[in-house]
Amino acid sequence: MEIVVIAIIPMLLFLLGAGFLVVAQVSGFMQSTFFNQRHNFSNMIIQRYMERITLAQGELFQRKQELEGISAQLSLSNQELARLNDMKSKFLSMVVHDVRTPLASIRGFSELLLRRKVEEKEAAYLKNIVSSTDQLGRLISDLTDLAMIEAGKLKMEKFPFNFPDMAKDVLPGLSINAQKKSVELIVHDLPEGVQVDGDKFRLSQVFMNLVNNAIKFTPEGRRVDVAFRREGKYIGVLVKDSGIGIHPSETKKIFEKFYQAKYQKDQKLRKQGWGLGLSIAQEVVRAHKGDIGATSPGLGKGSTFWFRIPVGT
Ligand code: ADP
């Protein structure tokens, strides 16, 4: 019995070893098949990505060429635009120059005739000619400024001057305009001796433009207040009127050239201007490193126009 057991044990051990070997072989085989499949799958994905990348590269190249074409066209259009703009500026300054001279003689001769003994009706006609030539003259000078701004030639002749004195010089003329319209013009806090290093003529043009606009857009019997403020290194001017006011959507747009407020329905007032004064004023103030703006509580509630420029050192 013992001999049988002793003989069976090695056989069992042999069979067990062989079994293990077979299992190991089968599992190795299965693992390598699985690995190969995964490897092939990854290769396929990589290949697809490569194909897509190649396609995208082709498209990118095509787009780049298209963009280069568009950019070349744009550059040509830009050159053409610059040429046309230059022609427009030259044309504008030629017209302005050629209109100014005959306008001066029309005005001069009308005034001469007015000094003679003429009938009341004729005098009224002549006065009308004079005021119309004045209106045209203002347009011509605004167009001259615009042509200079567009050509980049609006130069500021800067010298130190007394800012309140500049205001004092022009206020009498502005008061006359206010009286003609039956608008009360009140000046507050005119300071003494504030020196500014700037273009006196241009800055007085800005000041007059704001006050004249305030008078123009204020109905008879109401008032316009002009105040001066020292704000740090700036001297500021505020022109507050009790006129037609400005819609909130237009307080910035009115500083664009040729812009007249859409909510300003009075055709007579529209025809008195060209929407150029404020854009020129903005250029002048910016050339002095200052700021300009307008606020209004709303239509019919008046507005406040202001500008400020640095004081001299
Ligand atoms: P314009 O010669 O037409 O007055 P501006 O450039 O001086 O040209 O003004 C542009 C527009 O801004 C005016 O047409 C008007 O609509 C508006 N505006 C200017 N000042 C006032 C004001 N004080 N009150 C209301 N609207 C104003």
Image (cartoon, helix red, strand yellow):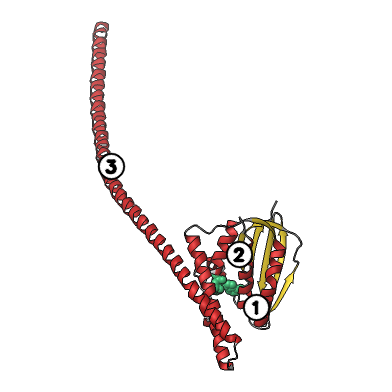
Judged from the image, the secondary structure of the residue bearing numbered disc 2 is strand
Tell me the kind of residue under disc 1: Asn
Tell us which disc is closer to us: 3 or 1.
Answer: 1
User: Considering only order in the chain, which callout, 1 or 2, is on the residue closer to the N terminus?
Assistant: 1
Residue 293, numbered circle: 2
Camera sees residue 71: yes
Q: Is mark 2 within 8 Å of ligand 1?
A: no
Circles 2, 1 touching at the beta carbon (< 8 Å):
no
Judged from the image, the secondary structure of the residue bearing numbered disc 1 is helix
Residue 57, numbered circle: 3
Looking at this view, name the residue that lies furthest to the top. 3
Picture quadrant where residue 171 is located:
bottom right
Q: Using a 10 Å C-alpha cutoff, classify the residue at mark 3 as few (fewer than 14 neighbours), some (14 to 19) or many (20 or more).
A: few
Q: Is residue 282 above or below residue 59?
A: below
Q: Using a 10 Å C-alpha cutoff, classify the residue at mark 2 as few (fewer than 14 neighbours), some (14 to 19) or many (20 or more).
A: some
User: Considering only order in the chain, which callout, 2 or 3, is on the residue closer to the N terminus?
Assistant: 3
Residue highlighted by disc 1: 177
Image coords of residue 25 (percent x, y)? 23, 21
Residue 219, numbered circle: none
Camera sees residue 246: no
Q: Using a 10 Å C-alpha cutoff, classify the residue at mark 1 as few (fewer than 14 neighbours), some (14 to 19) or many (20 or more).
A: some
Tell us which disc is closer to us: 2 or 1.
Answer: 1
Image coords of residue 278 (percent x, y)? 56, 67
Q: Nearer the viewer, residue 311 or 10?
A: 311
User: Considering only order in the chain, which callout, 1 or 3, is on the residue closer to the N terminus?
Assistant: 3
> What whole-number distance in Å separates the C-alpha atoms at marks 2 and 1?
23 Å
Q: Residue at x 26, y 38 (%)?
A: 50
Image quarter hosting the N terminus: top left
Q: Residue at x 75, y 60 (%)?
A: 193
